[in-house]
Amino acid sequence: MNLTDVQALDNRDPLAEYREQFKLPENTIYLDGNSLGAMTTATEKHLQHVISQQWSQDLISSWNEHNWIHLPQTVGEKIARLIGAGPEQTICCDSISVNLFKALAAALALAQSHDSERNIVLSTKDNFPTDLYMVQGISHFLGQHRCQLKLVEESELQQHIDDKTAVILATEVNFRTGRRLDAKPLVTAAHEKGALVILDLAHSAGAMPVHLDNWRADFAVGCTYKYLNGGPGAPAFIYAAKRHHKAMTQPLSGWFGHARPFDFTPDYQPAGGIQQMLTGTPSVIAMAAVDSALDVFEQVNLDTLREKSLQLGDVFHQLLKEHNLDKTLTLISPQQREERGSQLSYHYEHAYGLCQALIQRGIVADFRAPNYIRFGFTPLYNSFEDIWRATEQLRQVIAEKEHLDPRWQQRNPVT
């Protein structure tokens, strides 16, 4: 495969025009959208308006005049379309960690209202650490008789569901390997055993079709700063299936989750529906960034997005093999394209140095401990020519041993 071949792929790309809607740095090929998405031009323009007009001039009237008060719901509904959720089940707020706490507490309470002996939260050994930490925190708070974390291999998750399982906490796309979990049979198996399911969509939302309602998922969380391009530290989202709304409760009873927050009554009365998942006052500027970033998806067909994502990965690995680098870099992502998310991960002894040497050449990938390098593919702004040029630079770095430079032996605080 040569440059002419990949340029032909770009010429046939139905998503190519979306690249113009992003603020991409010059002389940089960005393959790290699975950590932090790029800024859209609409976001830059909208934030200027929020700061210079809504905050600066309209001040507190903007809560009503510019609908700040309903931003969590407005943004939540935009996200809902991307995760296969019907109306009034998704809301944008807080962080994934905080939303996981709420979802875990709600799911445990629901499960134990039917069977008080259920106390196991079943998850995978290689789940993203914050997911596991939040379960451990709840376990310390409630006691293991109410919440006990059980970790199993990802491939064995379904077979470990039993009559003690209250909640299965699973991530659809593994952050390290990029392996995609088949969510629907997992949810079905859990429900057959009387357990509930919380799905983490951090590496799914905005990268592929998600079908929460169709899967009959109970709860889900996800972030907006990766494939949804909401900005660093952008607020996350939480989904709760409508069938649970009347019975569910969550303990972070902040004033924005109150049925009538501006009555300022001393006793908490939760709002109905998904709004009860709100806690404190939303970060308006951060949420305004997410709101505008999501507009780029308005006309995007998610099946087309997914196909390009997989094709980008296919081309990357094919070029890697053509450069005879597939023996140097060991693929830990699934070989079968339908079993992976929108990234390829490789094991390499000098992965950190390789990542830093590539960044020095304008190719931004990322490193994950202990020795993995990840290449994320964002179909709305990555081109096939990006992939060709990135693998060419990768070949040169390894051939010239730039990644062994002593500069790269000391790791940065953020790796």
Image (cartoon, rainbow, N blue to C red):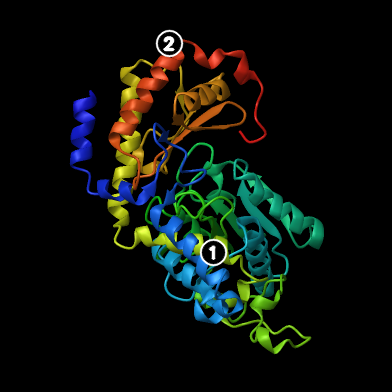
Q: In which quarter of the image is residue 161?
A: bottom right
Q: In this orientation, which residue lies closer to the viewer: 235 or 191?
A: 235
Give the left or right position of residue 155, taking residue 277 as reference.
left
Identify the residue under disc 2. 399
Q: In this orientation, which residue lies closer to the viewer: 308 or 247?
A: 308
Q: Is residue 209 above or below residue 342?
A: below
Whether residues under marks 1 and 2 lie with C-beta atoms below 8 angstroms apart, the answer is no
The quarter of the picture where the C terminus appears is top right
Q: In this view, does 77 lie above or below 294?
A: below
Give the left or right position of residue 300, taking residue 85 as reference.
left
Q: Where is residue 335 in the image (x, y as percent from the top left)?
A: 38, 33
Q: Is mark 2 on a helix, strand or loop?
A: helix
The quarter of the picture where the N terminus appears is top left
Cα separation, mark 1 vs mark 2, equals: 48 Å
Q: In this orientation, which residue lies closer to the viewer: 289 or 324?
A: 289
Q: Position of residue 15 (x, y in %)?
A: 26, 49
Number of residues whose C-alpha sits closer than 10 Å to that of mark 2, classed few (under 14), some (14–19) or many (20 or more): few
Return the disc, 1 or 2, that comes first in the chain's sequence: 1
Identify the residue under disc 1. 51
- At label 1, which amino acid type do we have? Ile
Mark 1 or 2, closer to the camera: 1
Q: Quadrant of residue 396?
A: top left
Q: Residue at the spot x=73%, y=83% of the render?
A: 268
Q: What element carries label 1?
A: helix
- At label 2, which amino acid type do we have? Ala
Q: Residue at the spot x=33%, y=33% of the render?
A: 386
Q: Where is residue 346 in the image (x, y as percent from the top left)?
A: 48, 27
